[in-house]
Amino acid sequence: MNILIIGSEGFIGSNCERYFSKNHSVLSCDVIELEKKNYFNLEHKSFQSIIGNHNIHVCINCSGSSNVAESYHNPQNDFQLNTKNVGVFLDAIRLSQPECKFINLSSAAVYGNPTELPVSEKTQIAPISNYGFHKVYAEQICNQYSQVYNVKTISIRIFSAYGPGLKKQLLWDIYQKAKNNQDQIELFGTGMETRDFIFIEDIVEAVELLIGNAEFKGEAYNLASGVEIKINEVSKLLLEKLNWKGEVFFNNKELEGYPKYWKSEISKIKKIGFVPKVNLINGIEETVKWMNQL
């Protein structure tokens, strides 16, 4: 199978490239200048020319921005990266590779602050950030191209992804603060906020399952562990594994655009055979091993 990975140099994209390269022919593209086999720089080569000159069976879109705060400061750039580009990719597929399956990596941010937990794919879409809105629009474009042009699309609503290699978001923030201050670190919120974490290896294996089993009719799938955990518990677990002995202080300040509570219903993706393999304790241990090597 020939697979094209867009955004191959990011956290999820690089892991998808490593995973699928074992058994498939993989092409990759991003906006970074690299000397790498079967790699294309989208700054110099159009997506239309890439997809038009290669026989691609599956396209995995791992590109875009995941910076919620930046989506407020520069909404047009976030719209370009997370919404408009999806339309560009799909139109190129429509014109050149109409049988290609397109996997759009979306986000649980489309749900905003849900009124009930766990959230399922039937839960009302109610984003609270520009980032969340732009992910909704991208899903709608996928659905549009599926319905109007019969392009094979799905969207994966990923909850709190983590693992070795991720140099942003909660665990990385805690690690950086702990490394630079042995006595006390300050975190946003109350510590009672919750998240549903999903380890990177489970993410890429879920993508493989979806390639072989999803309908590809514009539908969306939640991707998470289905386990809710408080931020103060996550921070305690990480800091214990880092052997950090200081004090954690929660400042009770909310971060704009971030939900308070998340827990996913994952029965839909379980029906195609997905079972999360890496629990949070083991996943954090693997992440800390990587952090200790930096």
Image (cartoon, rainbow, N blue to C red):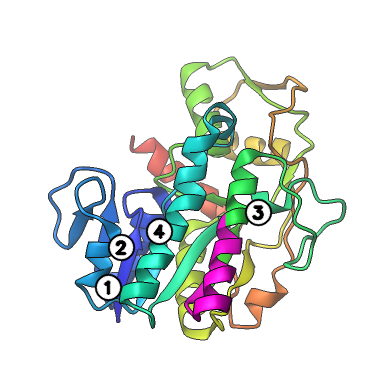
Q: Quadrant of the N terminus?
A: bottom left
Q: Quadrant of residue 174?
A: top right
Which of pointers 3 and 4 indicates the residue nearer the eye? 4
Secondary element at tag 3: helix
Residue to which mark 4 is pinned:
88
Residue to which mark 3 is pinned:
108
Please tell me which of labels 1 and 4 falls first in the chain: 1
Please tell me which of labels 3 and 4 falls first in the chain: 4
- Give the CA distance from mark 2 to mark 3: 25 Å
Are the two marked residues, 2 and 1, in contact with CB atoms closer than 8 angstroms? yes
Circle 3 crowding by C-alpha within 10 Å: few under 14, some 14–19, many from 20? many
Checking the image for residue 22, the label placed there is 1
Q: Residue 19 location, x and y as percent?
A: 34, 67
Q: Residue 252 location, x and y as percent?
A: 78, 22
Checking the image for residue 18, the label placed there is 2
- Give the CA distance from mark 2 to mark 1: 7 Å
Name the residue: 47% across, 51% down: 84
- Magenta span: 138-153
Which of pointers 2 and 4 indicates the residue nearer the eye? 4
